[in-house]
Image: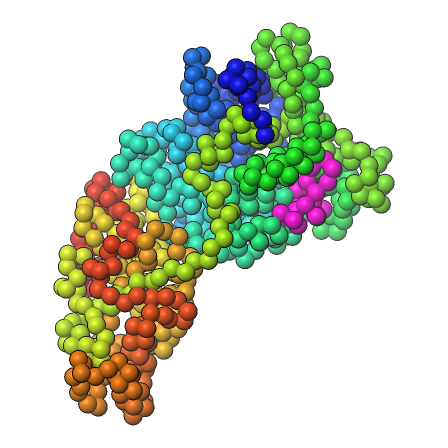
C-alpha cells in the first residue's frame, strides 16, 4: 500500500483520468452512453456491440475514480464529469432494457429462453442486434450485475433513476431474477453447456450474482435521500433464501457440465460477496487456483476450446468427444488475476495482493510499445472491421485525440490482453507438460473489462480510494461472518374465538383472540400475496407487478406497517386451503418444527421473527379434561403429570388433537427442536419485531389494498 502527499495524489488521479479517458471513456457512445466490447467482427460475434455485463464492469473504474476525486478540492469538474459518465452508461443500459419491458413481463410467467432480455445491444442506437432464438440471451448474471452496480452507485450518492416508471421497471427486474435458482441460463460465457449446443443449465455464477443483487438492492431508495416510499425497492426474504441455499449446495461446482469455473471468483469475492460461509469460500477459491490457475491467468473452465488454435471456428458448437483435444491447452485469461487482487484488497490479505500483482505484471502490455494504437477513436464503432481474422478480435485501437497523429498514447498506460493462447507449434509440448510453454496474447487488446478492474485495484492499492467508498453497502462483510444464527423466534398464539380461548386456558395455554390484539390487524397470508401484486405494477410499461406467488415463512414472520397501522400475517404453511395435508395435525407439527428451524437459520434482519399462529376448533376443538383444577393452586409439574395421564386415557380419535395441543404447550419451555422460542402476547412482541413498510401501497390507486387487508383479516 502506498501513501501520497496532496500534490502527488492529484498527480496520480490526473494520470488515471487520462488513462481512463483513453481506454474507456473515449469509446463511450455520445448518444447512448454505451461502450463497445471491441472493434472487431469475428465468428464469435460483433465485438462492436455493447454487452450488458461488459459495460457494467468497464464503467467500474470510472466510478472508482469519480469517488477518488470527491476526496480532493476538484476545481476542474472532473468528479462531476466522471460521475455523469457513469450515470450516462447506466441509464443507457436501462433504456435498452426498458424498450424490452414486454419481454420482462412475459418472462415472469414463462422463464422461456425466447422471452428473456437481450444480453447485448447496438452501441450507437441501443437496438437489439441478434434475434431472440439466434443467441444465448438468457444470462441472469448480466441483469444481476446491473442491479448490484445500481444499488452500490445509488448508495454512494449517484442518482441514476429519475421517474417512478423507471422505479417500477427496476422492481420488475427484481422479479425477473428472483427465480434464478430454478432457471437454467447460458451463463457468463454465453454458452450454457460447455459443448455449446445451445442447451442452458443452472449456473452457480448466475445464481450467486442474483443473490448479491437481491440482497444489495433490497430497501434501496432509488431517488436517494430525496425519495419517498414509492421509490423503494422491495425483495421478499424467502426469494433471497431460496437462491442462497441453492448456491450454497452447489458450490464449488459451477454447473452440470462445468465442475469448476473461474467466473465464481466474482461470486465469492468482488463484486458479489454472495457467500457467508468462509470455509466454502476458501474451498471454492482453492479449487479455482488448483484446477484453473496458470502463469498467464486462469482458464475459464476445464476443456474450454474458445480461441484455442485447434478450435474449429467454422461452427459454434463442439462434439462431445471433441472436448478432449482442448485439455491442457485452454486459453488463460489475465482478467482473473484482477479478481484475486481485488479479493485480497477487500479481505485485507496483503500477501495475496502482492502475489497476484507480481503475476499480472509481466502479462501487461505497455501502450507506448504499440505503434498501431492510434486508430481507436475513429475505428471503434466504424464499419471497416469485417475482414478481420475469424479467430480473435483484432486491432490495438485506443488513443486520445492528441495522440492519433503520432500513433501512440501520450504516456505509458498498462493494457491487459483478453487472453493468452498456446501457439500451434507448441500445442503438443504443452499437452505433454502443462504450464511449460510460452503463450501469446491474442489481438483483443485491451480487454476493457479487465483493464477497468485493474485500474480499480490500483486506486485502492495506492490509497487513492478506500474499499468503503466503492462498497458503501458493505457487501464485503458478508464474506467475513463467523457467527451462527441463534435467533429467538417469537410465537403468538391466537384462538379462533373466546370459547376455544377458554378451553385452552383450562390447559394452561394462554392465547388471544383477534379482537384482543387490536389495534394490530392479523390477516390471512393471501392478503399479503394480493397487495404485493401492486409492487412494480405499471400500465404504461405493460407490467403487472409481482406474480401471485405465496409469501414464505420469512416474509410472514415480519410485521408490516401501512400509514402507521400494523398488520401481522399467519404463516402460509398453515393454510389448509393451499395444502390439505396441513389438516393432519401430526404432519403440521413436523412442518412447524421445520419452519421454526428454517426461520432461525436464515433470519438476517434486525429484531426477531414473529410467527402468529391461529388455533381453530378444527385443530383443537372437542378436547376435555378428566377433571377441573384450580390453575393457581396447581404447579406446572402437576399439570404436566395430569396431562400425561389424561392423554394416555384418551380415545384414539382425539390423539391427533392432543398431540398438537401438547406441542404448543411444550413451546412454553422456551425451546423447540433446538430452536429458542418465546411465547407471548402480540403487543409485547412489537418492540422486538422487525417491521417492514408497505407505504408504497398508498400511491397505488388501482388496488383496494385496505379492503384486501381487512378482508383477509375476516377470513
| Residue at screen point 66% across, 28% down | 416
- Residue projecting furthest to the bottom: 649
Q: Position of residue 425 (x, y in %)?
A: 85, 34
Q: Quadrant of the N terminus?
A: top right
In the displayed structure, would residue 25 be above or below residue 289?
A: above
Q: Position of residue 253 (x, y in %)?
A: 61, 53
Q: Is residue 489 left or right of residue 409?
A: left
| Front residue of this view, candidates 332 and 467 | 467
| Residue at screen point 41% across, 65% down | 597
Per the image, is 299 magenta? Answer: yes
| Front residue of this view, candidates 531 and 116 | 531
**Residue 447 appears in the figure:** yes
Residues shaded magenta: 284-306
Q: Quadrant of the C terminus?
A: bottom left
> Which of the 4 image quadrants contains residue 293?
top right
| Residue at screen point 50% across, 28% down | 465
**Residue 314 appears in the figure:** no
Per the image, is 646 magenta? Answer: no
The colour scheme applied to this rendered structure is rainbow
| Front residue of this view, candidates 462 and 286 | 462
Q: Is residue 107 left or right of residue 698?
A: right
In the displayed structure, would residue 604 be above or below residue 670?
A: above
Q: Is residue 394 left or right of residue 281?
A: right
| Residue at screen point 24% across, 71% down | 615
| Front residue of this view, candidates 476 and 284 | 476
Q: Is residue 238 left or right of residue 229?
A: right
Q: Position of residue 688 (x, y in %)?
A: 28, 55
Q: Position of residue 607 (x, y in %)?
A: 32, 53
Instruction: Tally the marks.
Output: 0
In the displayed structure, would residue 11 be above or below residue 46?
A: above
Amino acid at each position: 500500500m502506498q501513501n501520497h502527499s496532496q500534490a502527488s495524489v492529484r498527480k496520480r488521479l490526473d494520470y488515471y483520468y487520462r488513462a481512463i479517458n483513453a481506454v474507456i471513456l473515449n469509446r463511450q457512445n455520445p448518444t447512448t452512453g454505451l461502450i463497445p466490447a471491441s472493434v472487431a467482427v469475428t465468428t464469435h460475434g460483433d465485438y462492436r456491440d455493447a454487452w450488458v455485463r461488459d459495460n457494467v464492469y468497464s464503467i467500474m473504474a470510472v466510478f472508482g475514480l469519480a469517488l477518488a476525486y470527491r476526496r480532493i478540492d476538484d476545481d476542474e469538474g472532473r468528479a462531476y464529469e466522471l460521475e455523469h459518465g457513469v450515470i450516462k452508461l447506466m441509464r443507457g443500459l436501462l433504456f435498452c432494457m426498458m424498450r424490452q419491458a414486454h419481454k420482462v413481463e412475459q418472462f415472469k410467467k414463462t422463464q422461456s429462453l425466447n422471452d428473456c432480455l437481450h444480453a447485448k445491444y447496438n452501441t450507437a442506437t441501443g437496438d437489439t442486434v441478434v434475434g431472440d432464438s439466434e443467441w444465448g440471451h438468457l444470462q441472469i448474471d448480466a441483469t444481476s450485475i446491473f442491479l448490484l452496480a445500481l444499488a452500490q452507485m445509488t448508495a454512494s450518492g449517484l442518482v441514476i433513476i429519475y421517474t417512478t416508471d423507471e422505479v417500477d421497471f427496476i422492481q420488475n427486474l427484481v422479479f425477473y431474477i428472483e427465480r434464478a435458482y430454478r432457471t437454467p441460463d447460458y451463463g457468463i460465457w454465453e454458452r450454457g453447456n460447455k459443448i455449446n449446443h445451445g442447451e442452458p443449465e443452472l449456473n452457480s455464477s448466475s445464481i450467486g450474482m442474483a443473490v448479491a443483487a437481491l440482497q444489495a438492492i433490497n430497501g434501496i431508495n432509488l431517488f436517494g435521500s430525496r425519495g419517498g416510499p414509492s421509490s423503494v425497492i422491495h425483495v421478499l426474504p424467502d426469494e433471497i433464501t431460496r437462491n442462497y441455499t441453492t448456491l450454497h449446495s452447489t458450490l464449488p461446482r459451477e454447473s452440470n457440465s462445468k465442475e469448476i469455473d473461474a467466473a465464481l471468483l466474482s461470486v465469492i469475492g468482488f463484486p458479489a460477496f454472495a457467500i457467508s460461509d468462509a470455509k466454502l469460500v476458501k474451498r471454492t477459491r482453492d479449487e479455482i487456483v488448483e484446477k484453473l490457475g496458470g502463469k498467464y491467468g486462469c482458464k475459464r473452465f476445464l476443456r474450454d476450446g474458445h480461441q484455442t488454435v485447434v478450435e474449429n471456428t467454422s461452427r459454434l458448437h463442439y462434439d462431445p468427444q471433441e472436448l478432449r483435444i482442448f485439455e491442457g491447452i485452454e486459453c488463460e485469461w489475465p482478467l482473473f488475476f484482477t479478481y484475486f487482487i481485488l479479493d485480497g484488497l477487500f479481505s485485507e490479505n496483503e500477501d495475496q495482493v502482492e502475489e497476484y500483482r507480481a503475476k499480472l505484471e509481466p502479462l501487461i502490455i505497455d501502450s507506448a510499445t504499440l505503434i498501431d494504437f492510434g486508430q481507436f477513436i475513429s475505428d471503434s464503432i466504424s464499419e471497416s472491421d469485417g475482414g478481420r481474422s475469424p479467430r480473435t478480435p483484432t486491432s490495438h485501437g485506443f488513443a486520445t485525440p492528441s495522440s492519433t497523429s503520432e500513433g501512440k498514447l501520450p504516456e505509458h498506460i498498462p493494457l491487459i490482453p483478453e487472453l493468452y493462447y498456446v501457439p500451434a507449434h507448441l500445442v503438443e509440448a504443452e499437452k505433454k507438460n502443462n504450464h511449460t510453454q510460452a503463450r501469446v496474447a491474442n489481438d483483443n487488446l485491451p480487454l476493457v473489462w479487465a483493464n477497468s478492474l485493474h485500474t480499480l485495484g490500483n486506486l485502492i492499492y495506492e490509497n487513492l480510494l478506500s474499499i468503503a467508498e466503492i462498497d458503501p453497502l458493505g457487501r464485503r462483510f458478508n464474506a467475513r461472518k463467523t457467527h451462527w444464527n441463534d435467533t429467538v423466534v417469537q410465537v403468538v398464539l391466537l384462538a379462533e374465538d373466546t370459547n376455544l380461548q377458554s378451553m385452552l386456558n383450562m390447559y394452561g395455554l394462554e392465547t388471544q383472540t383477534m379482537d384482543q390484539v387490536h389495534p394490530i390487524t392479523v390477516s390471512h397470508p393471501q392478503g399479503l400475496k394480493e397487495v404485493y401484486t401492486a409492487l412494480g405494477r405499471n400500465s404504461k410499461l405493460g407490467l403487472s407487478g409481482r406474480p401471485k406467488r405465496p409469501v414464505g415463512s420469512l416474509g410472514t414472520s415480519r410485521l408490516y406497517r401501512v400509514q402507521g397501522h400494523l398488520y401481522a400475517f399467519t404463516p402460509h404453511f398453515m393454510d389448509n386451503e393451499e395444502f390439505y395435508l396441513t389438516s393432519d395435525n401430526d404432519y403440521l407439527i413436523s412442518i412447524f418444527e421445520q419452519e421454526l428451524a428454517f426461520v432461525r437459520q436464515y433470519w438476517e434482519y434486525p429484531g426477531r421473527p414473529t410467527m402468529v399462529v391461529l388455533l381453530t376448533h378444527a385443530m383443537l376443538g372437542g378436547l376435555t379434561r378428566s377433571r377441573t383444577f384450580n390453575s393457581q393452586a396447581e404447579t406446572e409439574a402437576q399439570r404436566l403429570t395430569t396431562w400425561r395421564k389424561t392423554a394416555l386415557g384418551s380415545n384414539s380419535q382425539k390423539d391427533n388433537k392432543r398431540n398438537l395441543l401438547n406441542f404448543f404447550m411444550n413451546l412454553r419451555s422456551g425451546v423447540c427442536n433446538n430452536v429458542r422460542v418465546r411465547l407471548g402476547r402480540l403487543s409485547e412482541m412489537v418492540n422486538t419485531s422487525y417491521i417492514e413498510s408497505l407505504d408504497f401501497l398508498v400511491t397505488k390507486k388501482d388496488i383496494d389494498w385496505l379492503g384486501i387487508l381487512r378482508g383477509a383479516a375476516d377470513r
